[in-house]
Amino acid sequence: MIDSGSIKQLAGHPIDRRDFLKVLGWSGAAVALSGCGNTSVEDGKETVVSYVEANDYMIPGVGVYYNSTCAQCDAGCSINGRVREGRVLKLEGNPDSGINKGKMCGLGQAGVQDHYNPDRVREPLLRNGAKGETITWEKAYALIAEKLNGVKGEEIAFLSGGVSGHLKVLLGNYLDSIGSKNHFVYEALSPAGVRAANLKSYGVALPRYRLDKAKVVLSFGADFLGSWISPMHFSQQYAQFRKGADGQRGVLIQVESKMSLTGANADRWLVVKPGTEGVLALGIIHALGTASGEIAELVKAYDRVTVSKATGVSVSQIDKIAALLKLRSPSLVLAGSAVEGYAHGAQNAIAINLLNHVLGNVGKTIEAPVAVPFPQLAPSVGNTASLKALNDGLAAGRYKVMFSYATNPVFTAPGAFKFKDSMAKAGFKVAFAHYLDETALQADLVLPLDSALEDWGTQIPEYLADGMQLNIQQPLMEKLHANTRSMGDILLALVKQRRVEDYKGFEDYYAYLRSSLLQNKGALGAGGSDDDNFWNEALTKGILKIASSAAMLSDRAAASGLQLPKAEEVDAKFPMHFIPGVTASMRDGRHANQPWLQESPDPLTTIVWDSWVEIHPKKAFELGIAEGDIVEVTSKTGSIKAQAYLFSGIHPEAVSVPLGRGHEALGRYAKGFGVNPFGILDAVYDKETGELAMHETRVSIKKTGARVLIVKDEGAAGGLQMGRKIAVSKTTDQVDLSEEV
Amino acid sequence: MYRFLRLPILLVGLFLAVGSYADTQPALTTEDSLGPEVQQPIEFPHNRHTALRNPSDPANSDPLKGGMEIDCQYCHTYARRSAVAGIPPLQKCIGCHQSIESVRNKPRIVELFKYWDAKKPVPWKKVNDLPDFVRFNHERHIKRFVEQQNRPTQEACGYCHGDVKKMTVARRQKTLSMGWCASCHEKQHPVVAAGGTPVGNQAYWYGFQKPSEKPGAEVKAQGPNDCWQCHK
């Protein structure tokens, strides 16, 4: 074997290409000589397990396919899983779904790694000092009942991620039974600011965006191809948009301070000073010159020169955009997650939405969403304001019992919250968890959950792309671990503790689900059909499509009261804007323990398995930073150290670190890889909505002196093969991406 | 100086690593190509199930205990439908044996019913195994020899699995090595036989080998010889 000494020698003296090829050749020969033979033949040793009873369709070696719903994000894509010999092997999109239409993203593909993950919690664990002690489910349930005994409803807090469908109903009933109204729905990365702005601009939180109908898409920081709202749906609309309706290929202009995947696909990418997206939008309205009345009054002060100065976008670019928008109609203007991260985030988004009114897009490319006919099943969508409320309550010692489900606030709360300390003040903390993540580690009782591929459920996505649909989630295979439970089963058991009469008819969550759906089959569009037929068809299709009316869309522009801040003073101590990067695969980091996601290169930087600090080459040159330098990024709240990556797709006065990595727990593929930028976020809020302003943190950066080789697919790592040029190349500091197209 | 050292160290390491792994592997085959004798949880008598009813068959030493003449595919029903032959579900055994009272109290059958009552599969040991980089397809061989060429199932299965009429617990009969597979794929096999499904030109794409066409002679073709037919 290679001993560690020789490895160190090798590490100290990098192998060059010649040596590498020599080793490759020799080791190939070595394998050919000594490894020849049937080294994987296991006859007489391996056990072949047959079925006890097999259905006709179960043939070893031949796949069976089941429809279910993806649980990797909230978009609600329908999936189709290939199951062979009782094991789920591969997920694909379900073509019947109006949301993803048979397609699926990388994050969804990694769902099988969530299921087979070796770090899943397998037994109920009760805290005993610093350790978790395995206990039985009966004891766990009894313990919860005991701890809730004599506790008033207002002293109980239930924190969850976004929930919908029958789980939401059951959760609501349980909270009702214990007299608690404190359900905090928290999503670290939710479009809450955009929702609030849209409510004012269009009268609905999320209208249906029709990229496919638009001839120009002007997107302000909406990464709709990567991670924004329903990326699989938008990607397909985008393909239509690019094809064009009458031979006219759609033009995408992306305005943002840090290039996203969508920005990289745009025809024109414009870098804008962080936080001034709204100003630019008003400047474009001014340049269009078609607005009247209130809006004309509002944009009067936003002439091209002033706007250009404030945003850093040149006058000619503003003119070009205005000319293009005039030339091609309908267009679509999107206010995405990058614009809402400021103290004036909602105002920013409202200003951008005004453009759609001025351009007459409302009703054309901004359509009314469908109304969910069963409000009790409609999704409770998360935001960050709820986390603040919970954190304040916890810090004040208001809660004796706290439940946590499908969210990991100890990891995702801004460092300024000191959430871990607040949480410690709750008397008894229960975490329903798939993994021992940072939050579960702080809990007193951890209850292990079935994976999404083992569980029953119903789901209604927030963004109903193509009519009302109720998504069915069903097990694709038997449970891997005997002692995990479905969240539905747990809630049913808990609610039975209080209301045994109401729920005694339901043996388990499956029975509850089946009977609730059958009771409403008339409303679900299957009035006359036989119960079993209806149920089997629902499971076969994995989707219940339901007739529904459209919600009302308001076409009255919301210009009154719109106020955008003047340019602010630069804090000499923390001069740079900090942009937490949202990547399509990592998002808020809940899936960081799925190695496929860690090893798939970031689409823009090609970096794997680690965090990086994106910094503009000009700024890097100013500060004497080269690629691979370990830099320290310090905010008022804290600091992180990571490798610098020189990236022309970022505003020179901003740095960005991707979210999702830097776990201290969660599992072997997540723990210790990269740094967690959530930890240095200041607690700044959107003045209007109270949402966390994620982009308002200011930082300073400093070289630490250490340098590493960045592990990435792009270019030649280590530089030994450098100098081999395929195309004419330019150094990155000479590239101005806005001039490239 | 290290520059001289590191390459040999790496190579020696590689040899040792690969060599020590290979050493622990059992010998490929015994002299007569038989695989190892495998202890099964239940000693399943293949001869009892498959041998001919005819008492004069030399496979039956006791004429009163003749075979049942059951077709291989009755139990190994997956072979014609899938790449893998699979092991019959326990249900299949019980399906017959629940109505065969005469052997109900025999030790092996009692054992079988214990598994059935517990609804647990019998942990059979694998007898014929191929390396993970080889994909053998049962279905195609059954189609080729049983359906197209109308050969008896036992003969077609026996090309690889030997004469199960003479076995109790199955044992690997052939080397199942690449050379052995190729030795059969090199031969000219008749494409159509009386009573078989005529295939015509299909044999050409089926085997990627053009059938030999001598007027009046039997149409024959070789098995596929592309690497990726098995290594994919």
Image (tube, coloured by chain):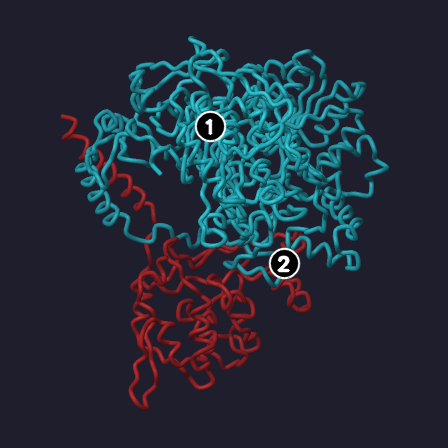
Chain colours: A cyan, B red
> Between residues B35 and A206, which one lies in front from this camera angle?
A206
| Residue closest to the far right | A501
Question: Which dot, 1 or 2, sits closer to the camera?
Answer: 1
Q: Quadrant of residue A727?
A: top left
Upstream in the sequence, badge 1 or badge 2? 2
Residue on which disc 1 sits: A581
Q: Position of residue B80 (x, y in %)?
A: 50, 68
Amino acid, disc 2: Glu
* Residue A595 visible at all: no
| Residue closest to the far top | A573
Circle 2 packing at 10 Å, graded few (<14), some (14-19), many (20+), is: some
Q: Quadrant of the N terminus of chain A?
A: top left
* Residue A618 visible at all: yes
Q: Position of residue A190 (x, y in %)?
A: 59, 30
Task: Please tell me the numbered disc located at residue A213.
Answer: none
Same chain, marks 1 and 2?
Answer: yes
From what the image shows, is residue A602 above or below residue A88? above
Image-based side of A11 in relation to A466, left or right? left
Answer whether labels 1 and 2 touch (C-beta < 8 Å): no
Q: Quadrant of residue B134?
A: bottom left
Residue on which disc 2 sits: A53
Helix or strand or loop: what does disc 1 sit on?
A: strand
Helix or strand or loop: what does disc 2 sit on?
A: loop
Residue found 46% across the figure and 28% down from its top: A581
